[in-house]
Each structure stands twice: as C-alpha cells, then as structure tokens.
Image (cartoon, helix red, strand yellow):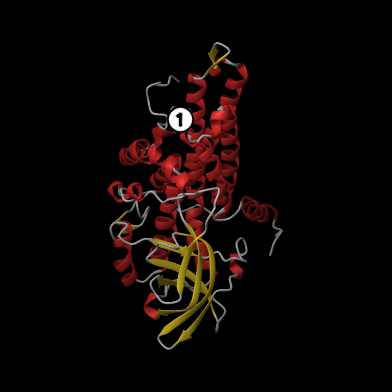
C-alpha cells in the first residue's frame, strides 16, 4: 500500500494486511491511537540517544500516566482496567518505539503491580497501586538470582521470621528497576517451612542495595540491577498474604508471558516499517531498491511472518478475554513471536546495508533489544520444553 514519503521515519506504515484493526472497538482504537501518537512523536525520536547513552529517558517515561496505561488490566485503585486486547496493543506500540520503555512498563504494570493486585491485601492495594499508576512510586520484581534463572524455583534467597518481622538475605540479578524502585517485590524461601513467599521490600531499608548492571548490549536505556539483601528487616504487614508457594509466583508470571509476544510484534513491526521506507527511498543503479525482485521477495516473506505474529497475538488476547489463556499457549506465542521477530529484524538490518547499523535508522536498536525479550520471562528453550511436555506427556527437565 502507498507510503507517505514525508511522514517521519518512525511512523508506522501499512502492516495491517489482514485488517485485524476491524476487531478493535472504539475504546480500544482510541487508546491504540493515543499510544501510537505518543510513540511516533515522543518515544521514537528520543530513543536512539537514550539507548546510546544507556540512560533512562525520564522525560518520556513521566508522560505515560497521561495515557492512562500504567496498571494494564487492574480494576480500580487508579488503574485503567483495560481489556486484554488493549493491554496487548499498548505493549506492542511501546516496543515499536523503544523496547526499554516497553520493558519498564512491563515491570511496573505487569510484574510489580500485578503481584500486589493478585496477591496483596486490600490495605497493600490501597497504599501502593494508586501511587504506582501515577508513577509516583516505581516498582521492581525480584525473582531471578545469579545462579538461578530458568530454574528460578530453586531460589536461594531466604526469609527468616523474627518476631513481627522477617529477615531477608540473598542476592538477585537482572532485576528491572531494582536500583530505582521504591518497593521491590522480593521472592524468598521461608527457612522454617521451605515455601516461597513474597515481600514488598522498602528499598530504603538498611541492607538493601541495588546496583545497575553496566555494559549491556540490549535494552540499554532501562536499568537492570544486581540486588543484595543483607539482613533486610521487613515487617509482616509488607508480606504478600496471597503468596504462599512458588505456584503463586508462577500465577503472576503466567499473566505477563503473553505480553512478551506482543512486545516482539512491536519490535518486528518497527523493523519492517524501517526496511520498507528505506527501500522505497534508497536508489541504487538508477532505481529504487524496492523495484528489485529480491527486495520484494524479502518484504513479502517478512510481511507473511509479521501477519502471522499478529494473529497469534489477537488469539491470545481473545483467550485471555475468555479467561481461557493457558500458560503453555502464552509460552508458545512468546516462543514463536520472538523467534520470528529476530528473523524479521535481521532481514531488515541487511536490507538497509551499512546504514542499518546506525541508531538513527532504528533497526539495529530493535535487533539488539529483541534479544532480551527472547530470553526474559522464560527463554525460548524453556518455553519449547514446557509446550513439549504438554503435547507428549514427558518432561525433558525437572
């Protein structure tokens, strides 16, 4: 379909080849377009410099509450209470602009806030969720440890009861927002019962330290942290009462896994858009690159994969709306979409030639950032084995 050559490089083009937007209602469309304008006018122009400097773009982040998107599908407490399709569209659009921003939002809304909404007391919800929806309070989610990523169920951080308090000791790694959060959801093993519990740790408490992990080659403008917990005293009122085992941790993660599929779609869309615009404008040997058969072949194959990713996302949104989205289905969508996004972005980078490695052309940033989504919240390998276990009845891991 025709492209406006005067439109900004970052403005999304015609990737809705199967007309999935016809399934959006008015409210979904309004939110989608508001976030799209924010991405095109605010997020994408600022993203290359923030990525290059490995700095969080606070002037961009602080505008998110204006869009009423922080808190995703949480009802009440100042949160938007969006339906699953709207939540997915928001995640897609944020990632289309900047994977780091999308990751910040996913940690804040999908992990930290969702832990409180699903497992917290009414008092905890009233105290924390409104402030988090306004971004007056930043949250983090502390599960992964230096020695336990895919086998996070084996976490070694401990919680020891001491009167009316708990004493937490251990280390966490790759904790998004862990160095800037006011509250971090920390998962720790009760030394007495060996069960996994959740705590809303005030990060100003003595013994809590979050240190930014430096020299990343992906998601550079969102900060992940090494977190150390050295005798951190947490009052009983800050324990999540609904978190009684690792299964409750898994319940939170299951709600956010589908978000990764939507984020991968956003990155792939950005890559396809940039490649299409480039080959229409770039002339070699006296004509546009787009006039060459091999370029058209690449574009069509990229579009075929992109539309397939869209249909995956639309279906998991419908299943979530029907309260029928199984973790294995969300995992399959994440596995498929991150794999396809990596391929689309590699093709886009190649089509831009030497210009493809310039941050101002966006593709290489998305190409690097998709590597994080490919790994976090369950690697492609782990998602494959979980689905494999379901379809064969045999577990390839313990």
Residue 265 % position (x, y): 50, 40
Residue 194 % position (x, y): 57, 79
In which quadrant is the N terminus drawn?
top left
Q: Residue pushed farthest top?
A: 286
Q: Which residue is mark 1?
A: 16
Residue at horizontal 30 percent and vertical 62 percent from the top: 131
On the image, which quarter does residue 364 sit in?
A: top right
Q: How many marks?
A: 1
Residue at horizontal 47 percent and vertical 29 percent from the top: 15
Please state which of residues 240 and 322 is positioned toward the viewer in this rendering: 240
Q: Residue pushed farthest bottom?
A: 163
Residue at horizontal 44 percent and vertical 59 percent from the top: 177
Residue 386 % position (x, y): 63, 55
Residue 306 % position (x, y): 53, 34
| Image vertical order of residue 24 relative to residue 233, above or below | above
Please state which of residues 110 and 376 is positioned toward the viewer in this rendering: 376
């Amino acid at each position: 379909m025709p492209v406006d050559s005067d439109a900004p490089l970052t403005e999304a083009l015609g990737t809705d080849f199967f007309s999935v937007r016809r399934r959006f209602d008015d409210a979904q469309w309004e939110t989608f377009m508001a976030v799209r304008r924010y991405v095109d006018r605010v997020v994408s122009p600022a993203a290359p410099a923030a990525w290059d400097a490995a700095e969080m773009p606070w002037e961009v982040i602080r505008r998110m509450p204006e869009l009423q998107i922080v808190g995703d599908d949480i009802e009440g407490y100042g949160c938007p209470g969006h339906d699953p399709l709207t939540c997915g569209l928001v995640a897609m659009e944020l990632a289309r602009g900047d994977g780091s921003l999308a990751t910040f939002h996913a940690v804040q809304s999908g992990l930290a806030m969702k832990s409180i909404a699903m497992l917290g007391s009414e008092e905890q919800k009233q105290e924390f969720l409104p402030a988090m929806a306004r971004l007056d309070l930043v949250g983090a989610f502390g599960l992964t440890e230096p020695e336990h990523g895919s086998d996070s169920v084996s976490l070694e951080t401990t919680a020891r009861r001491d009167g009316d308090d708990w004493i937490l000791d251990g280390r966490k790694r790759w904790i998004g927002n862990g160095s800037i959060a006011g509250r971090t959801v920390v998962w720790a093993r009760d030394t007495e019962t060996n069960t996994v519990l959740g705590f809303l740790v005030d990060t100003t408490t003595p013994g809590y330290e979050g240190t930014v992990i430096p020299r990343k080659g992906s998601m550079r403008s969102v900060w992940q942290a090494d977190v150390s917990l050295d005798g951190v005293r947490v009052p009983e009122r800050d324990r999540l009462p609904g978190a009684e085992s690792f299964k409750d941790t898994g319940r939170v993660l299951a709600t956010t896994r589908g978000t990764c599929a939507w984020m991968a779609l956003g990155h792939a869309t950005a890559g396809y858009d940039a490649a299409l615009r480039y080959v229409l404008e770039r002339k070699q040997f006296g004509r546009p690159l787009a006039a060459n058969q091999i370029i058209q072949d690449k574009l069509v194959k990229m579009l075929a994969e992109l539309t397939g990713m869209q249909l995956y996302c639309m279906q998991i949104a419908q299943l979530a709306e029907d309260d029928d989205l199984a973790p294995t289905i969300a995992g399959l969508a994440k596995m498929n979409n991150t794999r396809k996004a990596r391929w689309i972005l590699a093709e886009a980078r190649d089509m831009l030639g030497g210009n493809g490695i310039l941050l101002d052309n966006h593709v290489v940033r998305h190409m690097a950032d998709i590597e994080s989504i490919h790994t976090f919240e369950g690697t492609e390998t782990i998602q494959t084995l979980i689905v494999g276990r379901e379809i064969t009845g045999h577990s390839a891991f313990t």
